[in-house]
Amino acid sequence: MSTTTTSDSRSSREKAPAGERVADWADGRLGIYSLAKSNMRKIFPDHWSFMLGEICLYSFIIIILTGVYLTLFFHPSMNEVEYHGSYIPLQGQLMSEAFNSTMHISFDVRGGLLIRQIHHWAALIFLAGMFVHMMRVFFTGAFRKPREVNWVFGFLLFVLGMFTGFTGYSLPDDLLSGTGVRFMEGAVLSVPIVGTYLSFFLFGGEFPGGDFVARFYSVHVLLLPGIMLGLVVGHLILVFYHKHTQFAGPGKTNNNVVGMPLLPVYMAKAGGFFFLVFGVIAAIAAIASINPIWAMGPYRPDMVSTGAQPDWYMGFSEGLIRVMPGWEINLWGHTLVLGVFIPLVIFPLVLVAIAVYPFIESWVTGDKREHHILDRPRNVPTRTAFGAAWISWYFVLLVGGGNDIWATHFHLAINSITWFVRIAFFVVPVLTFMATKRICLGLQRRDRDKVLHGRESGIIKRLPHGEFIEVHEPLSQDALHTLTAHDQYKPAEIGPTVDENGVERKVSGAQKLRARMSEGFYGEEGQIPKPTVEEYKEITSGHGHH
Amino acid sequence: MSSQDIPEENVPAERATDDHAEHGHGAVAVADEQNPFADPGLPPHEHRIQDIDERAAKRSERLVALLFVLSMLATVGFIASYVAIPNDKSVFIFPLGHISALNFALGMSLGVALFAIGAGAVHWARTLMSDVEIADERHPIEAEPEVKAKVMADFKAGAKESALGRRKLIRNTMFGALALFPLSGVMLLRDLGPLPGTKLRHTLWSKGKLLVNMNTNEPLRPSDVAVGSLTFAKPEGLETDDEDFQKEIAKAALMIIRLQPDNIKDKQEVEWSYDGIVAFSKICTHVGCPISLYEQQTHHALCPCHQSTFDLSDGARVIFGPAGHALPQLQIGVNAEGYLEALSDFTQPVGPAFWERG
């Protein structure tokens, strides 16, 4: 290209505006125009539930920003020092440098307490946001093809977020978090054969030793956030690549995405939402104290406070450990600590149960198509019931994790709460599953009714022979379409196992299982047939319709 | 099993209404005689007041600008608070009570500064930017068959040129090398900590060690321990500023109670006690919390972490909760000077159970 060449619309004397020249420069090296062509006016559909993921993304950014600030002052060391900061009640106390520097951040660095509290609050909101976002994706079936990989990315972010949170709140080496670390040591010790070795390697010897804060620190600020950052980027790239899902509605099909463009609407809305989230978290940190380590004091393995609770996202594992009977098997000079080891095994299984569901569902349906239209939870009763059962399970364990708090606040015996949780662990998910499924089927019947007979108008009409009826108003075509847009699967059948020549066909156990599950999902008990055009026409044509 | 084993009849047919996809925005919704459930296409755009009334648009503009100005003021407020408010000033704010003035001022001004930017941007987007819905096409994620065929051919060519399949010796040794080299990394983890040995079996207690009151740092006499009281003790010679204090107290922490001797149900507990004074490990046998709640009427000790409950009048056996075995007892007596002393170390490991505990 000759140096005089500029864009076509301009004469060669006129220079392009500065912004365009910078963009040209970047395009020549990075190819940004091709990137912008497909993304600058990318369409995003609008629904309140789509912002839940944004809350997670923004709180993650807030955590990184505030976390970097905290590293400027925090000393990840367990060397013992005497406290001489400005908090009078702890004067002269022996404590680790980790605790001392956290005290310094809280009382002697101006704004340090605020940043600490923003960091911790944002972590709680990050985890809560991921939990709710995951439920949104689950109940609307947004995990279906082509988004299964992104579901797994999100799940990994949730699990890694839990461990990043745990290693983070253990860093100040205060009495509460130290108790949590001791619990972790006990759990590691329970692992058969290698548990004692793992514990010694983790703590650099006997608990608590002098190493774990420094080790947790590198895990908390580098290893886990590094992996998470990669996953977040991958998650977002896939969201862009797949294009966002949308709910059924007029003009919305599986082959389009209806909404507003990234530039300017979502740039402003999503960009603005970052500031809204940050602003709200800053205000929370201004008025609500979190993890007041000065009130708990430095960690001592021989001291503890009552009402010790982990951060909320660890509560379900706390529930597992609290309600498990203390089984111990001693044989041949060895101890199998089932009372601790079983909870340690169930802990990941609780999480994996929800993570693998999408793959089970896709196996049962055998559906290989792409799905971009979201399901209404009622239209997939078995999935919705499974999700609700899982949540109820999770919350039963949260109750178990806070059994002492429940006991003191509601004046209940700790023993009865523990027994309640032990039974509820098995019973409540089953009951929730059945109740949710019934509710979904009921809602499906109501939708069917509305489509076929119209909406209850509230107008009562008296017929010539004296009968009173309520006038039903037919739905608009928009509503008719929206309420009938969902797919309904037919249960998969194995078919005859003996062909016409009497030759028996082999049916594998997996096939039988799949057929049975498919019957459960999509059989008569699993869904209400949606109204057909014929049914609608027959009823609306007037024959016998009041 | 692949899903090919079962016919695909259960998968519903593609939505019949997809041909309506090309209904652009604002397409007139025509009731379909054939299919009343057909997709009527995007509804026509409804104007907002700002679209038709310039004065309303101006009002929105002013509100957005006001929010941005508010944010600027709040940032000024943040800087002013940082400079003006001393770090240790506390202030009463209803209903929060006495809180740090600086934390409150910084947090609220930062919160307002950020929230106002967000609120302004969102209000701008909602009222002044176009809200006409646009439909964008989706394309299948899967590659076209020709693309796939090309990739498969390329891969085959590359694999063939590498001769990996043909030269098995190279392939197998390469796999071997790649499988082995991570072992170096595993080896490097070895020095993360020492081997356990019998460290978990021993504590600082040994014959003749005095029981020192944790609070007063004085050796205990039997008369210091009243019936119904709970006393925490450590072994003589262990001081809080010792380098390994944390590690040692994590095993050696002791709780001492005094019972009426005839209230003690367990025979060994009586033998290892002194005049109704019994000493148990304070470290819970569940996951190692220090047990610190004692109910003197029932002689029950409760771990506040996971509520394991031990009957201290009956060999500290577990009567409720997740702990798997009784608290180890320390055999105690009184020395010539009349002080309480240990008669040996704990005879079984204290704290959480582990594989080698036996």
Image (tube, rainbow, N blue to C red):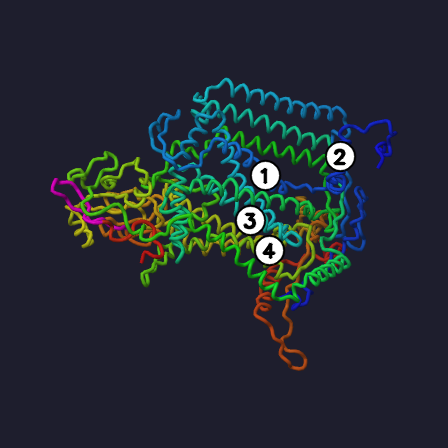
Residue drawn at (60%, 47%) of the image: A136
Disc 2 + disc 1, Cβ < 8 Å: no
* Horizontal and vertical percent position of residue A363: 62, 61
Q: Label 3 lies in what chain?
A: A
Residue B331 magenta-highlighted:
yes
Residue under label 4, please give it.
A358
- Sequence order check, earlier mark of 1 and 4: 1
**Marks 3/2: CA distance?**
38 Å
Disc 3 + disc 1, Cβ < 8 Å: no
Q: Secondary structure at mark 2?
A: helix
Label 3, residues with CA under 10 Å away: few <14, some 14-19, many ≥20? some
**Marks 3/4: CA distance?**
15 Å
**Marks 1/4: CA distance?**
24 Å
- Who is closer to the viewer here, A255 or B282? B282
Residue B142 magenta-highlighted:
no
Residue A55, numbered label: 1
Residue drawn at (48%, 53%) of the image: B186
- Sequence order check, earlier mark of 3 and 4: 3
